[in-house]
Amino acid sequence: MSVQSVVIVGAGQSGGRAAALLRQEGFQGDITLIGAEAHPPYERPPLSKAVLKGDKTADHCFLYEADFYQQQNITLITGKTVEAIDADAHTVTLDDGTSHSFDALIFATGGVVKRLPLPGADLAGIHVVRTLDDSAELGKALTPGARIVVIGGGFIGLETAATARQKECDVTVLEGAPRILGRSIPEVVAAAVSRLHEENGIKIVLNARIQAFEGSDHVTGIRFEDGSVMPADAVVIGIGIAPGTDLAKSAGVECGDGIMVDEFGATNIPGIYATGDCACGNNPRYGAAIRLESWQNADMQARTVARSICGKPEAYAPVPWLWSDQFDWTLQTAGLPHRAEKIVTRGQYEDGAQIFFCLEGDTLIGVAGFGKGSAIAKDVRMAQMMMERGVNPDPAALADESIPLRKIMKDG
């Protein structure tokens, strides 16, 4: 069946890019892009950093200029929620009762912020950082001397903590696990990140056991299972997201750790696709279904889906890449560094930056770099290229900084 109309459910980065890329790939039919937020599509990485710090406004985050969607003949509907999807009738119904038909449907429903189901969880002053509005609201609380408690030692939690400290707040990070970044990077890399935060005056509490939030109307502290209380003027919950799968499930789409898609972005129902944080995609490179939460994936998977709909299928088998800015340092990773069985450290770079190569058996499975600014970007990219090309270098050569990585890749 020729596709004449596409409906995209979710107007975040991946949904917005999918709409634009459909046009770029030559699609001339109707495109309807539906988002629950009042804002047009925007990028989320600045929310915990530049926007929260006040260095950027919402306008800097938008994917395109205000008139882009009209110029591209894309119908953008904001502030509306899709209530139901009929996969057989090929229709979506919105919360205002209107319906839209489709030949192809793209789920770009992102993720839902995880919260803590504890007493006092509905108190004012307890924040999350997922949307522009979330960032703006939290920003009001980041005043000099304010006692900010961040729950969660993952990327979002640590980025938010760093920004709050730069705003001269008194910051504590609570992590329930024995270390920070436990699901993302090897322990030696996490230790370097932890040192950076502690050197900048952030207190990190591991194995934290939270029992309740204290306060009557506004949060005043956090009570732990041992009965002690930590005072707080504001609390940030940064414990991750759950993929937005409810609509897909109701439409009969197969879901697991996200909306299950093949390497072309297609679900088990013909004509229905998924992209971005909500999608768990088969990755032929690793022989597994992987859900990625990153700027790169939101963009590249959207391209894959757009090409599939336009009859130009191209398998998506990425070596994942992401970055995280904390203070004036940047953490970059590529591949699957959390699967490392052995770590090879490549000496000292300028200003103490380091590269950590992650091996699974004899296979280079991932890399992590941590340094100021872009100090480690080139070598992380080189390691990513090695993984893309299936090069498995000699660990001794990786550790020898006198041997350029380009030569190692060429010789491999």
Image (cartoon, rainbow, N blue to C red):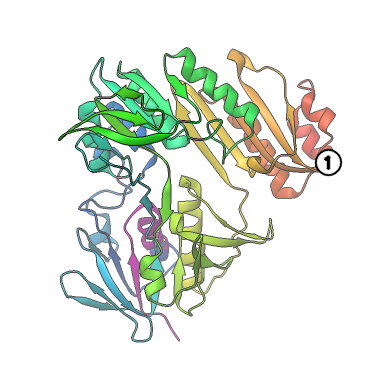
Instruction: Give the position of the C terminus as an image quadrant.
Output: top right
Q: Hey, what amino acid is under mark 1?
A: Gly
Q: Nearer the viewer, residue 206 or 140?
A: 206
> Do we see residue 55 in this rendering?
no
Q: Residue at x 63, y 49 (%)?
A: 319
Number of numbered labels in the structure image: 1
Image coordinates of residue 82 in percent, x first then y, are: 27, 68
User: In the image, is residue 302 above or below residue 382?
Assistant: below
Task: Give left or right: position of 15 versus 138.
Answer: right
Q: Which residues are magenta?
A: 1-21
Q: Quadrant of residue 172?
A: top left
Name the residue at 21% across, 36% down: 137
- Specify whether residue 373 is painted magenta: no
Q: Quadrant of the N terminus?
A: bottom left
Relative to 243, residue 216 above or below: above
The answer, for residue 12, to whether it is visible in the render is yes
The residue where tag 1 is placed is 412
Taking the spot 46% from the left edge, 23% from the top edge, the residue there is 204
Q: Nearer the viewer, residue 389 or 182?
A: 182
Q: Residues within 10 Å of mark 1 (few under 14, many from 20)?
A: few
Instruction: Give me the residue at 31% from left, 41% from top.
Output: 61
Where does residue 123 sit, x and y in percent of width and height?
21, 39
230 lies left or right of 317: left
Residue 188's place in the image compared with 2, above or below, is: above
Q: Measured from the top left, where is residue 242 in percent x and y?
A: 42, 53
Above or below, comparing residue 291 to residue 60 in the picture: below
Q: Secondary structure at mark 1?
A: loop
Q: Is residue 119 left or right of residue 337?
A: left
Q: Position of residue 393 (x, y in %)?
A: 81, 38
